Amino acid sequence: MRIEQDIKLDYQDVLFKPKRSTLTSRKDVDLTRQFKFYNSGKEWTGVPIMASNMDGVGTFSMAKIFQEHKMITVLRKHYSLDDWKVAIGDGVKMKYLAVCTGTGVIWDKDAPDYNTMKAVLQKYPDIPFICVDVANGYHENYGDFIEKLRYEYQDKTIIAGNVITGEMTEELILRGADVVKCGIGPGSVCTTRLMTGVGVPQLSGVIECADAANGVGGHIIADGGCVHPGDVAKAFGAGAHFVMLGGMLAGHDEAEGEVVDGKVQFYGMSSNAAMERHGSRKDGYRGAEGKVVELPHKGPVQSTITEILGGVRSAATYIGAKRMKDMSKCTTFVRVNNVVNHVFTRFE
Ligand code: 5GP
């Protein structure tokens, strides 16, 4: 047994140190980034914020609003090809979409999510991103799967995860991923840290994974744990190329969910609620690692998007970053002592 003694930090453990800046207004900050991806060789320009592939978040209604801001939506994997046909006909464009799959096809060649992904990509070859979403990206057969997928879809930008350490970020990129999804346990409806005791505080994890990805020419997504616009800014400050959001976007009109007494249900994708809704492998060994919460109905997501983008812009002006690209090199974090707050927000 070994203990790493250096302190690992979450978003709430730091603040940006303000710096002298020549920016006169937050509207002068350029939030777009241009990336060339390591394996696909494809270029992409946009605002690097993603809606997570969760029920109530990765919806076509969300995609319609997100594309207006040049932001990406990773569609929940339970949409059928017919759902896609309706949505594309209804004005959802492809440039800012990712189609999602799990890895069930490793065990079952009839895995519906994988077959739907194939059919969607056949029908809509302009979709740039494939997201392969599993809770634990450390399995050897996960890397094998990414390698095969890379071979099959050479021109697609592959998003793979989740991991939260540098060596696995490198491995996934070297095996064919372009963008690694980083975060084990920070999610608002995730119970992995409680159920398994596994995880790494998100800010430190993102710093480590971004560093590893930069070393091999890849990119990362800071996935999970953002509760306030300032957390999104901190993730970019930590070096994330993209930030993925679940809970901050949930509970809006675009969730495509039912509103009961002014409340919207939101659940983790490995919660019992999700397993019941979508069915899943029940092998007798699987425990739920997600929970259900009730959120107040928040109305149209546009106002939340405005707050998030406004917060990030403002953070950039405080640290003197003219472009999103400059945020991490302009960042100095100061540690703050809010241990009590930390305990309450984590285990509420
Ligand atoms: P949030 O922005 O809500 O803090 O985090 C969203 C992320 O939480 C998702 O993108 C996904 O990676 C993760 N997530 C979603 N559902 C679950 C779940 O049931 N269990 C776990 N461990 N993580 C989840």
Image (spheres, helix red, strand yellow):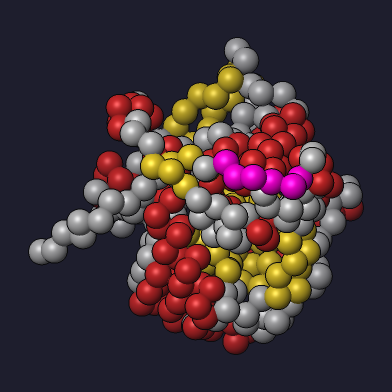
Give percent across and percent down for residue 26. 76, 40
Image position of 71 with respect to 130: above or below: above
Q: Report the residue that reaches farthest toward the left.
A: 1
Give percent across and percent down for residue 168. 40, 72
The residue at the point 54 percent across, 59 percent down is 239
Q: Is residue 248 left or right of residue 182?
A: right
Q: Is residue 15 left or right of residue 197?
A: right
The part of the image, by quadrant, that contains residue 41 is bottom right
Tell me where the magenta segment starts and ends, as one range: 18-23
Q: Report the residue that reaches farthest toward the top.
A: 261
Give percent across and percent down for residue 79. 67, 52
Residue 58 vs residue 318, the one in the foreground: 318
The residue at the point 81 percent across, 61 percent down is 94
Image position of 318 with respect to 140: above or below: above
Residue 114 shown in magenta:
no
Give percent across and percent down for residue 151. 60, 87
